[in-house]
Every structure is written in structure tokens, then in C-alpha cells.
């Protein structure tokens, strides 16, 4: 499942933050309580400043950042670097992806010159999935290797062989995607609908090319279970009802 690392929801670095940690590692408390074994890696403050926690100290990585994603091995963090003048609520017209090494503290640019957002590591850590509209004129998923090579648009690409996959909606807002458990190359996320939101599923092959994409219909709050099913909420006769669906890769 995709990681979400950040230590805040409001205020500056000295205020509360939302912790982002390596997958499967115990969460810790406030930043000053962090110890290395707990592996809390970075945190995002309420004004969207991104910090790393190294040896008990907070180190500024970016003045403005989108939600970061931690690599499966916990050694690197990918994030969308926003302009320093950007404020929360502003439209994102420019964002560049960067990779931060927890071991060396080195910050490496991954993409530039567009509106690349919401990156997430593939389960094997070999690719990064992200969203962009400026690159093609249509909001789409793209992939790139952690070294910046292999950039490719993976959804909304015209294909006579797969006409059903020619249009695949991207997540609504900055909701991101959730990868399936047991390193399954399949994601679930929310898409915008006139009456609310719908639950979308997309499957990939080993190269992170789309093999299947379909909607589970109206719903909200999708999440994976340990059994590999998807649970989400749907309004039925005025009441929210939990729906569980088994999906194929």
C-alpha cells in the first residue's frame, strides 16, 4: 500500500505534524520523541514545508511540498516540490519531482518544467507513479525510474489494441492512490463524479504499463484489506453502507 509520510496538519515545524514512515514500521509520537528504530522519516507541516528527521533534528528539505512517498526499503523519499511562493489552496501549475536520500541527505531532481504531482513508489521500488496534466493536456498517470530515466505516459494514451484503456481518470484532488497488499501491482483511488465520487481500480504489468482499468461505481473512503479485497462506503437509501469487493490483477 502506498505510504504517506508527514508530521503535521497545521502550523510550522514547531507545531503538530502528520508522520510519514516506512511501510510496516511502528509509528512514533511527536518529533522530539523520535528514535531511529521507529523509522519516522519525514514530516509535512500545515504550511506544506517538508522536513526530514535525522539524529533527533529536523532538517528542511523543501519550503513547499506535496504529500511525500517513502520507498519500500525506507531509504528514499519522493515528493513534488512546489514554488516557494505557493500557498495551500492555490492551484498547482508548476511542480517538480525530487528524491531525497535518507542516508546521504542528497536531494536529486527527478522531473522538471511541468505540474508533476502525487508521486508514489511501485511495490518493488523500481518505478514511481505520478500525475500530470501539463505534459499531455489531459490529466494522466506517468511513470519514471528513481534515476529519472524511463519517463512514460501510462494512461490516456490512444491504443487501437486497448480502446477501453484510452481514457482512465486520475484521482480527484490530492487524494492519491493506494497500492494493493502483497506487492500486487494494482491501485485503488477516488475519481470525481457529478454527484460525488467513484472508486477506480487500475492494474499494471511488471513495467508499470496499464493492463486493466475499471470503476467499482459510486463510493468513498476506499481501502485495501489484508485479504486483498477492497472495502469502501456507498450511500444506499440515504445511509452509508460498507461494500467489500474482490478484485483481480
Image: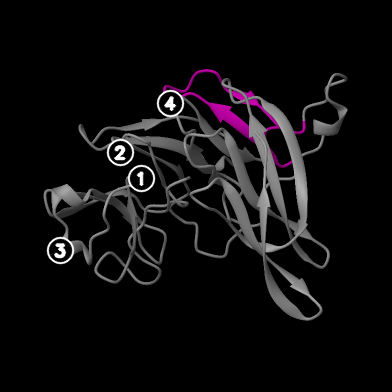
Q: Residue at x 54, y 34 (%)?
A: 184
Read off the magenta span.
134-156
Residue 147 is a magenta residue: yes
- Measured as percent of width and height from the top left, residue 215 is found at 77, 48
Q: CA gap, disc 1 to disc 3?
A: 19 Å
Q: Residues within 10 Å of mark 3 (few under 14, many from 20)?
A: few
Q: Residues within 10 Å of mark 4 (few under 14, many from 20)?
A: many
Which residue was labeled with disc 1? 23
**Which of disc 1 and disc 4 is earlier in sequence?**
1
Check whether the beta carbons of the residues at disc 1 and disc 3 lie within 8 A of each other.
no
Q: Residue at x 69, y 72 (%)?
A: 241
Which residue was labeled with disc 4? 146
Q: Secondary structure at mark 3?
A: helix
Which residue was labeled with disc 3? 33
Check whether the beta carbons of the residues at disc 4 and disc 1 lie within 8 A of each other.
no
In this image, 240 relative to 84: left or right?
right
Q: Secondary structure at mark 4?
A: loop
Amino acid at each position: 500500500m502506498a505510504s504517506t509520510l508527514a508530521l503535521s496538519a497545521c502550523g510550522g515545524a514547531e507545531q503538530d505534524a502528520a508522520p510519514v514512515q516506512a511501510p510496516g514500521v511502528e509509528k512514533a509520537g511527536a518529533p522530539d520523541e523520535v528514535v531511529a528504530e521507529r523509522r519516522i522519516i519525514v514530516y509535512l507541516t500545515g504550511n506544506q514545508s517538508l522536513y526530514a528527521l535525522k539524529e533527533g533534528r529536523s532538517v528542511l528539505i523543501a519550503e513547499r511540498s506535496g504529500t511525500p512517498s517513502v520507498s519500500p526499503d525506507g531509504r528514499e523519499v519522493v515528493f513534488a516540490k512546489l514554488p516557494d511562493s505557493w500557498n495551500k489552496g492555490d492551484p498547482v501549475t508548476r511542480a517538480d519531482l525530487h528524491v531525497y536520500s535518507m542516508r546521504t541527505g542528497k536531494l536529486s531532481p527527478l522531473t522538471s518544467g511541468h505540474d508533476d504531482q502525487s508521486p508514489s513508489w511501485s511495490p518493488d521500488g523500481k518505478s514511481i507513479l505520478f500525475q500530470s496534466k501539463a505534459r499531455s493536456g489531459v490529466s494522466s498517470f506517468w511513470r519514471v525510474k528513481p534515476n529519472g530515466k524511463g519517463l512514460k505516459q501510462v494512461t490516456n494514451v490512444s491504443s487501437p489494441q486497448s480502446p477501453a484503456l484510452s481514457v482512465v481518470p486520475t484521482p480527484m484532488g490530492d487524494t492519491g492512490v493506494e497500492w494493493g497488499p502483497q506487492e500486487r501491482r494494482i491501485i485503488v483511488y477516488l475519481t470525481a463524479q457529478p454527484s460525488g465520487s467513484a472508486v477506480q481500480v487500475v492494474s499494471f504489468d511488471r513495467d508499470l504499463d496499464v493492463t486493466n482499468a475499471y470503476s467499482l461505481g459510486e463510493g468513498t473512503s476506499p481501502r485495501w484489506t489484508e485479504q486483498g479485497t477492497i472495502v469502501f462506503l456507498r450511500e444506499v437509501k440515504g445511509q452509508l453502507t460498507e461494500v467489500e469487493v474482490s478484485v483481480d490483477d
